[in-house]
Amino acid sequence: MVHPRVYEALSQPVVGHLDPYFFAIMSEIEESLKLIYGTTEGITMVISGTGSAGMEASLANFLEPGRKFAVLANGYFCDRISEMGRRQEAQVVRFEKPWGATFEDQEAAEFIRREKPSLVAYVHAETSTGALQRGDRICAAAHEVGALVVADCVTSLGAMPVNADQTGIDIAYSCTQKGLSCPPGLSPMFLSPKAVAWLNQRTSSPRSWYLDLKLIRDYTTTSHRYHHTAPISMFYGLHQALAVILEEGPKSRWNRHLHCHQAFVDGIEAMGLAMHVPEGHRIPTLNTVVVPSGIDDAKVRARLLAQAGIEISGGFGPLAGKVFRVGVMGPLATEANLEFLLREFHRALAAEGYKS
Amino acid sequence: MVHPRVYEALSQPVVGHLDPYFFAIMSEIEESLKLIYGTTEGITMVISGTGSAGMEASLANFLEPGRKFAVLANGYFCDRISEMGRRQEAQVVRFEKPWGATFEDQEAAEFIRREKPSLVAYVHAETSTGALQRGDRICAAAHEVGALVVADCVTSLGAMPVNADQTGIDIAYSCTQKGLSCPPGLSPMFLSPKAVAWLNQRTSSPRSWYLDLKLIRDYTTTSHRYHHTAPISMFYGLHQALAVILEEGPKSRWNRHLHCHQAFVDGIEAMGLAMHVPEGHRIPTLNTVVVPSGIDDAKVRARLLAQAGIEISGGFGPLAGKVFRVGVMGPLATEANLEFLLREFHRALAAEGYKS
């Protein structure tokens, strides 16, 4: 759900892509993103494309053909990262776990020490499974072997702490339409000082010109030299979405999401249902609920949409038909909405034959 | 300038990126773009990035490492195309002309027959110079040697006919913020049946996953299988911008631009000034005027902005300080606006010492 102020911002008159007003907006966006990403040491920037463009920018800029790229693979977006790595002709090595599982500190560190890659990727919050991955030991192990770490924060940024500096992340990307409660269209990124230094020392040109981070940063921040014509309206929207978040305060926002998540889990368990991901490894804003045996998840979802106008998602890939995926985030994450959701979800399940 | 209806569309509530309503909007956009591109045989699609993303999509999908790529180079964007071609590791060969010159049928055909490339690129309307390039003989010569042709229509689409089928173009891309009078953020593309067939036969994966046209088309049009999360709001805006254009009627719109262009040239010549591009090779909507000797173009532009709120551009690269670049397009291209522009332009020039 998008705040009305964000919609209003989207419809404001555009200025030119080299207008000082646009660069002022951009600069405020970058500063706000530092608070949301949890960095005082690194830099933030915004890519003129959706979350997947941020993913591709991360790999196109920090991989070169033949380099070893280690992926901690436990869901759909890890597969996408792997595929993009192959298209950069990196040597992709994967540590695979079932969808919804997470990586323990020790096993992740052993994998990285054994493979000695130059880039490691993990997904902080996997939209396809609801699993949250701790990153600090992954980052520490990667730094031991001289690797940089890229973290997919598509579903976490803005909804929960990323703590980029503290975790040791070098490169992160996200989207605008999840934790930031803005329409899709931009990809906010984070780079650590080490990542910036690596980029500055890189002598080969990235395969993508459109996603060349050095050229983009030069345009948006350093010299303001024309690179591409930024989608001004989307930047207006993101600027306002960040203002809304900072007004509530990041900590209040994280706590609101955590509180709603706990209430959701309590309600689900009170119905006799089970969460797909073990406690302590769950994304607060994207809840995966096991579909009870004998119940057709698509029918429940269709009924919920028809009876209450509530849209929840199903699982896909190995989790097709096995989980409901329920987003509880942004302006929608309130106690009143949650009560309504749980009541209607139970009603739809019961109508499809579920007995708790 | 953007029509108020487009701004209003941008602020409408977003739907999901797999919502049937979004695909209905997308389908109407594709049909409208066929009229604007001038095709009944080819297909149109829209890239979730700005004009430069469309440029990169064209090269990433239709080039492979080692293939010969011939560029007709007469301005800034031809250089960008060449650079992107090199990043695809194509063998880039260039036929270079001074900025503002155009290619004659015979010399362009000879270049293509001699080089026998697999892809040829030219810029239909060069924003940096104001020069319009005819494409029919380029396309005919390219097809003789089995090459496909990509045309940069960033400054032409929506403002003047592209006639993709009739010209013989295989791949074209544009932006939304020029001839389509919409904020920047998307890149509308055209593919001929021959280009589609080439793509379908391609066995290697494009280096860009985000700009992989086969995957994008599968998402937007064919199976609706998730690729990326499309920037819904921008699609609402483009949908409305195309509706505004079709209501006026493409022919009326081209004629209005042509009429204003002719009136602009008459006014400029009446002031004793000269156009940079010879008659018959000019873009109707992007006029380049030679800066008279002894006049500082930056001072004239600053004065025009301060005295009348009119922003015109200067030249860059080899044309820095040598031309004014004056856009006369979209809702701004009216007789009344033109009279105001010419009067104020003359006043600013005179104040900076110009005597006609």
Image (cartoon, coloured by chain):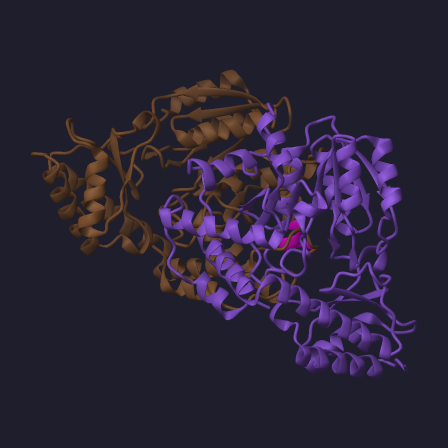
Chain colours: A brown, B purple
B242, above or below B18, in the image:
below
Residue A113 visible to an observer of this rendering: yes
Along the line of sight, the residue nearer the viewer: A192 or A269: A269
A183, above or below B306, in the image:
above
**Left or right, residue A59 beside residue B116:** left
Name the residue rendered at 50%, 48% in the picture: A188
**Left or right, residue B120 beside residue B163:** right
Along the line of sight, the residue nearer the viewer: B105 or A307: B105
**Left or right, residue B228 beside residue B289:** left
Q: Which residues are magenta?
A: A217-223
Numbered disc total: 0
**Left or right, residue B115 beside residue B338:** right
Residue A228 position in % (x across, y down): 65, 52
| Residue that protrudes farthest toward the top in the picture | A114
The question of residue B292 being in magenta is answered with no
Residue A145 position in % (x across, y down): 55, 23
